[in-house]
Image: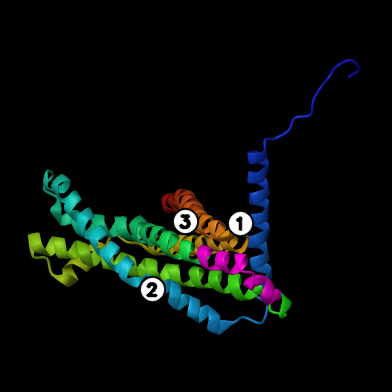
Amino acid sequence: MAGHNSKPFVFSRNVDDYFIGVAKAARFAGRFFREAFKSPFHLREIINQCYEVGLRSLPLITLTGFITGMVFTKQSRPSLESFGATSWLPSLISIAVVRALGSLVTALICSGKVGSSIGAELGSMRVTEQIDAMEVSAINPFKYLVVTRVWATTITIPVLALYCSFVGLLGSYVNVNAHEATSFIGFFEHGFESITFLDLFTSVIKSIFFGFTIGVVGCYKGFYASQGTQGVGKAANQAVVVSMFLVFIEEVVIVQISNWFRYF
């Protein structure tokens, strides 16, 4: 209007950078889907990355899963004892571990270990111009570096989550057997009476999403790292923080969706 001095609304730089970052990350994920199903597939590199993600994380996941199952059982026992229902422990622990703890513990460990490793590795390659050198030598760096790592995390983390659930149940069995002398077969028979196909399916689907998220976030932060060695550390740190945050968001959403199906 004439005579009215109005200024256009301007977002702050932080807000602008946030939405620009979200758009770049969405394009990055979209590029993965465009490249993932085209040859060459670099199967040897995918297998190598599965080894890096899987076997290198196995000792930590084994220890954490076992302790989680044992401690959760130990903490749940007094509450059930007050109702005279300690026989429900195998079912309670099986439901908790298979539905939530196994996949979530695995995702958080891999966010810290695998996500930071991918972010630091690709960030180091970016700041030392190795990625630029690959482009010059007619190698698609996105295909070789990003797609293979995302495939590896998406494939391997669900397997690790199932393994973590089993180890967690072993830890629970050790505690139950020490108090009630329950047999190994009896513990698992009683425990899996309460587990449905939907529980296992939901756990695997969650782990697939977790693995994809950890791989994409780690690769994205590393692939676009800058500012030299300082940027490498920043990329590794952001890969951990962002992937953990997204894992919790996905956990809430997928659990809510699975509960809708459970009530049908």
Foreground pick, 237 / 77: 237
Which mark is in front, 1 or 3? 1
Which mark is in front, 2 or 1? 1
Residue occupying image coordinates x 59% and y 73%: 145
Q: Earlier in the sequence, mark 2 or mark 1?
A: 2
Q: Residue 166 falls in which quadrant of the image?
A: bottom left
Check residue 131 for magenta coloring: yes
Q: Residue 146 falls in which quadrant of the image?
A: bottom right
Check residue 144 for magenta coloring: no
Foreground pick, 151 / 196: 151
Q: Give residue 216's position: percent from left, percent from top.
A: 56, 62
Q: Judging from the image, what secondary structure is the residue with disc 1 in?
A: loop
**Quadrant the N terminus occupies:** top right
Q: Give residue 36's position: percent from left, percent from top.
A: 63, 73
The numbered dot on residue 56 is 2
Q: Give residue 104's position: percent from left, percent from top.
A: 39, 57
Foreground pick, 30 / 28: 28
Foreground pick, 124 / 219: 124
Q: Is residue 32 visible?
A: yes
Q: Give residue 170's position: percent from left, percent from top.
A: 22, 67
Residue occupying image coordinates x 67% and y 62%: 30
Q: Is residue 142 visible?
A: no
Marks 2/1: CA–CA distance: 29 Å
Tell me which amino acid carries mark 1: Gln
The residue range painted magenta reads: 119-135
Q: Which residue is mark 3?
A: 240
Tell me which amino acid carries mark 2: Arg
Q: Is residue 88 left or right of residue 216?
A: left
Q: Which residue is mark 1?
A: 227
